Image (tube, helix red, strand yellow):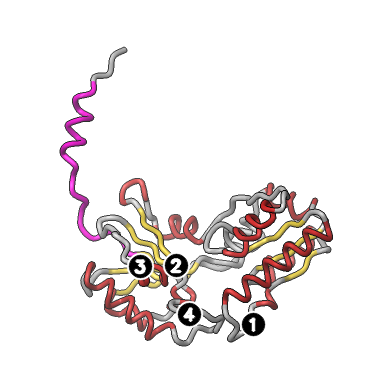
């Protein structure tokens, strides 16, 4: 569905919703829901499956089971997710995998994600700085070899370390302190970072909060944001590769 309700849907997405026998959807705003129902009245929300206190994996498995059951009974199903279905959406990927395992045809359509909106709103040019992208909890769980001279994007801060669905993620701030302490080892406490929340309604604007890294746990929009850390310093030139490229002659 893209990030901005009603405006980010591609023509391909609209046709899929209109022409499918059965539509299921997981969207976070009423405008997107209204758009889906207008395109196909035979649509059903799955948002009610997100029950407070329920383990996330159980929620995801319930969604997957519903999708596959509808596929079996209806013959063809379109499932609409907010943002990009390929980005941090286990039910989307797993439904496709399981459907294909039974011999069904299944595909995912591209869409506008938070990352795409962030590039435009923050002026991030990955052609110059590069970009590394991680889910925030996995970033803390595993010792990734990331590079501070390239941009760093960390997703799902609000659910950091959570295994259950517990909005409004009140435990996020003390866990963010753990993340802050870890990042400070590499970037220093004064490094400026951005909390970013993409606009969802046609008339709304992005929420952008710039803070020093040391102040991250006290930031206003921490529970709903994606974290972007701009590069610190310049990458080291690879002189050997530069010399190898310079030795190549181009002949007409």
Residue placed most toward the observer, 64 or 24: 64
Question: CB under 8 Å between callouts 2 and 3?
Answer: no
Depth-wise, is mark 2 or mark 3 nearer the camera?
3
Question: CB under 8 Å between callouts 4 and 3?
Answer: no
Depth-wise, is mark 2 or mark 4 nearer the camera?
4
Q: Name the residue tied to disc 4.
A: 162
Depth-wise, is mark 1 or mark 2 nearer the camera?
1
Q: CA distance from mark 4 to mark 3?
A: 16 Å
The first of marks 4 and 3 along the sequence is 3
Q: CA distance from mark 2 to mark 3?
A: 15 Å
Q: Name the residue tied to disc 3.
A: 142
The mark found on residue 155 in the picture is 2
Vertical position of residue 60 compared to residue 173: above or below: above
Tag 4: Cα neighbours inside 10 Å, few (<14), some, or many (≥20)? some
The mark found on residue 51 in the picture is 1
Tag 1: Cα neighbours inside 10 Å, few (<14), some, or many (≥20)? some
Residue visible at 68% across and 47% down in the picture: 12
Instruction: Count up the numbered dots.
Output: 4
Q: CA distance from mark 4 to mark 1?
A: 14 Å
Task: Check disc 3 and report its element: helix, strand or loop.
Answer: loop
The first of marks 2 and 3 along the sequence is 3
The first of marks 2 and 4 along the sequence is 2
Vertical position of residue 248 compared to residue 151: above or below: above
Residue pushed farthest top?
A: 252
In the displayed structure image, the side of residue 214 where residue 69 appears, left or right: right
């Amino acid at each position: 569905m893209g990030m901005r309700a009603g405006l980010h849907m591609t023509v391909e997405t609209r046709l899929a919703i209109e022409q499918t026998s059965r539509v299921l959807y997981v969207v976070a705003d009423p405008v997107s829901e209204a758009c889906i129902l207008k395109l196909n009245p035979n649509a059903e929300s799955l948002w009610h499956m997100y029950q407070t206190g329920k383990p996330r994996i159980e929620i995801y498995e319930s969604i997957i089971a519903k999708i596959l059951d509808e596929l079996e009974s209806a013959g063809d199903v379109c499932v609409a997710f907010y943002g990009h279905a390929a980005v941090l959406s286990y039910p989307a990927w797993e439904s496709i995998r399981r459907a294909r395992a039974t011999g069904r045809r299944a595909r995912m359509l591209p869409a506008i994600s938070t990352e795409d909106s962030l590039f435009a709103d923050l002026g991030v040019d990955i052609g110059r700085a590069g970009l590394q992208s991680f889910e925030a909890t996995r970033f803390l769980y595993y010792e990734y070899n990331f590079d501070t001279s390239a941009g760093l994007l960390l997703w799902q801060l609000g659910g950091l370390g959570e295994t259950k669905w517990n909005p409004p993620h009140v435990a996020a701030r003390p866990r963010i302190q753990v993340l802050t302490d870890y990042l400070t080892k590499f970037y220093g406490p004064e490094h400026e970072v951005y909390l970013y929340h993409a606009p969802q309604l046609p008339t709304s604007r992005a929420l952008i909060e710039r803070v020093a890294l040391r102040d991250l746990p006290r930031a206003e929009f921490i529970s709903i944001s994606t974290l972007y850390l701009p590069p610190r310093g310049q990458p080291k030139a690879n002189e050997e590769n530069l010399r190898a490229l310079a030795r190549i002659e181009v002949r007409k």
